[in-house]
C-alpha cells in the first residue's frame, strides 16, 4: 500500500512539507518518516475514502514532531552553559531516585498509569486499547496522575529549574525525603 500511496501522493506531500520547513533535507527526512508511519499504520485506515485526509494528518503530525524535537534540541544547546550539562544530569538522576517512594504513595491506578506511560514508554493509545477504554480516558488518567505526582514531589522537595525546565537544584523539605540527598 505504501508504494501506491507514494506514487499517487508523493509530489503533493513533498510540496506540502517543503512549504512548512526551511531546509530541503529536513523535508526529505520528514517525508521518509511519513512513509514509515504509513507503512506501520496502514492497517489502521478503515475507510479508503478518507485516505487523503488520513495522509495529511500524518504529515501535519510529523511536521509538528519535527519542530518539537528541533525546539527542544535548540533550547538545550542555547540554554545550558558548557560543562553544566553533566551537573544537570546528575541533579536530575538524584531527584529521579527520590521519585520511587513518592510514586509508591500514589493510588494503585495512578502508580500503574505512570509506570506504564512514563517509565515503560507505553503509548496512551496502546494502553487505551488494552484497557478497552477511550484514549481520552487514558489521557485524563495520565494528566491526573502526573499532577498528583508533581504535587507530592513539591510537598517533599524544593526544586529549582532553569527557563527550560532543567533541574538545577533541589532540597528535601521533610524527613521522609532525606534519601534525596
Image: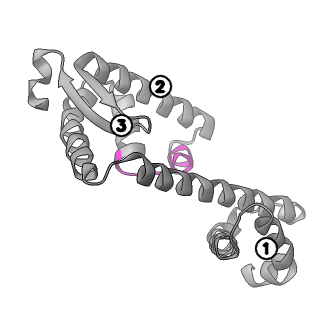
Query: Upstream in the sequence, badge 1 or badge 3?
Result: 1
* Label 2 – label 1 distance at C-alpha: 39 Å
Residue 134 appearing in the image: no
Query: Upstream in the sequence, badge 2 or badge 1?
Result: 1
Residue 122 on the magenta span? yes
Q: What x and y, as percent, mark residue 79?
A: 41, 46
Label 1 belongs to which residue? 14
Q: Quadrant of residue 112?
A: top left
* Label 3 – label 2 distance at C-alpha: 13 Å
Q: Identify the secondary structure beneath mark 3.
A: helix
Q: Identify the secondary structure beneath mark 2.
A: helix
Label 2 belongs to which residue? 144
Q: Identify the secondary structure beneath mark 1.
A: helix
Q: Quadrant of residue 137?
A: top right
Query: Upstream in the sequence, badge 3 or badge 2?
Result: 3
Identify the image quadrant of the C terminus: top left
Label 3 belongs to which residue? 112
Q: Quadrant of residue 58?
A: bottom right
What crowding class fits label 3: few (fewer than 14 Cα within 10 Å), some (14-19), or many (20 or more)? some
Residue at 36%, 47% (x, y): give it.
80
Instruction: Report the span colored magenta.
Output: 119-130
Identify the image quadrant of the N terminus: bottom right
Residue at 83%, 71% (x, y): give it.
15
Amino acid at each position: 500500500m505504501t508504494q501506491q500511496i507514494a506514487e499517487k501522493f508523493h509530489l503533493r506531500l513533498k510540496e506540502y512539507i517543503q512549504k512548512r520547513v526551511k531546509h530541503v533535507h529536513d523535508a526529505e527526512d520528514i517525508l521518509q518518516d511519513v512513509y514509515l508511519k504509513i507503512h506501520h499504520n496502514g492497517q489502521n485506515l478503515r475507510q479508503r475514502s478518507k485516505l487523503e485526509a488520513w495522509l495529511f494528518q500524518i504529515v501535519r503530525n510529523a511536521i509538528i514532531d519535527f519542530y518539537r524535537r528541533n525546539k527542544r534540541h535548540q533550547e538545550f544547546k542555547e540554554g545550558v552553559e558548557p560543562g553544566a550539562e553533566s551537573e544537570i544530569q546528575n541533579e536530575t538522576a538524584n531527584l529521579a531516585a527520590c521519585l520511587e517512594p513518592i510514586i509508591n504513595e500514589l493510588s494503585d491506578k495512578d502508580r500503574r498509569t505512570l509506570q506504564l506511560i512514563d517509565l515503560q514508554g507505553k503509548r496512551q493509545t496502546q494502553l487505551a486499547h488494552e484497557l478497552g477504554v477511550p484514549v481520552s480516558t487514558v489521557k485524563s488518567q495520565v494528566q491526573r496522575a502526573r499532577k498528583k505526582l508533581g504535587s507530592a514531589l513539591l510537598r517533599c522537595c524544593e526544586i529549582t529549574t532553569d527557563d527550560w525546565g532543567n533541574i538545577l537544584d533541589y532540597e528535601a523539605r521533610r524527613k521522609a525525603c532525606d534519601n534525596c540527598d
